[in-house]
Amino acid sequence: MFLKTISLACLVCAAVSVSAQTTDTLKKIADSGKVTFAYRESSVPFSYLAGSTQPIGLSVDLSMAVADSLKKRLNLPNLKIEWQSVTSANRIPLVTNGTIDLECGSTTNNSDRGKQVQFAINHFYTGTRLMVKKGTGIKNYPDLAKKTYATTSGTTNALVMRKHVADNKIDTEVLLGKDHADSMLMVEAGRAVAFAMDDILLFGLIGTAKNPAEWEVVGDALQVEPYACMMRKDDPKFAEVVNGTIGGLMKSGEFEKLYTKWFMQPIPPRNAAIGLPMNKELRDNLKALSDKPAL
């Protein structure tokens, strides 16, 4: 019995040791000489592809700033940066299993996800609205009755919409796209009348559409939520680097310059500006540096 107890204790200690190693991201990066960042293919203007294999956007710039901090912290001037495409469905598993070290895309920081991953300082605030083709007569959620709308699989928007239509007894059907571009295509092809998503992503998709003038964003904003970068839990040293980088950009005024670059100035691929001034929630967080999640 005593030997069994000792053996069990050893197994527990080994498991704790393995867990500690898997969450020591700085050691992982130092040993390998590389860091792996995630990117989204169509989360304009945060993280997207614009005619090349190199992602661009506000969140990509934040990732690159973290890379610069890692180079200094680990004394690795030649740190290799690798990029891994992720979707709404696989982004959390790829963070938790160690495939990627940091996901800066368009991910909502909420309490449920916080049980699986660690979130950095919030860097944007948005709410669910509807993107429709002009002239369809869709102005708000009740107009979806007896019609089909689209949203993206694995997003908080899908949950918010499900609750809203149920609470308000709106008789509507939903189609789930694998990514935002796929969801938009459903509306473009006439399979759905609206695409429910974070309003900023909808404005970004319109800016990169073939004919931006035929689209509009309508409806009340449902549940204002924060975006934040994701990393593995129980890794305070890596979180210190990430939050130190983002917080430093916010305190120095550099983050506001990045915001202007991606939201107020023309951006690829069509060199059109989104034209969305910084909202009060984000401006307040430039001082508060909060990582508070949505409910």
Image (cartoon, grey):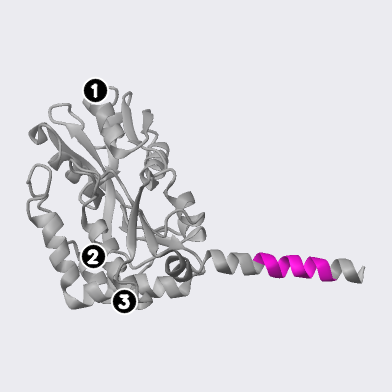
List the residue tagged with mark 3. 72
User: 4 or 186, which is in the foreground?
Assistant: 4
For the point 22% across and 37% down, the residue is 131
User: Does 148 appear in magenta?
Assistant: no
User: Callout 1 environment at 10 Å: few (<14), some (14 to 19), or many (20+)?
Assistant: few
The CA span between labels 1 and 3 is 49 Å
Magenta residues (range)? 6-15
Q: Amino acid at mark 1?
A: Ala
Which percent across, then down, holds residue 274?
12, 49
Give the image quarter of residue 13.
bottom right
For the point 35% across and 60% down, the residue is 229
Question: Relative to residue 116, is residue 108 drawn left or right?
Answer: left
The CA span between labels 1 and 2 is 35 Å
User: 151 or 142, which is in the foreground?
Assistant: 151
List the residue tagged with mark 2. 282
Please tell me whether mark 3 sits on a helix, a strand or a loop.
helix
Magenta-colored segment: predominant secondary structure: helix
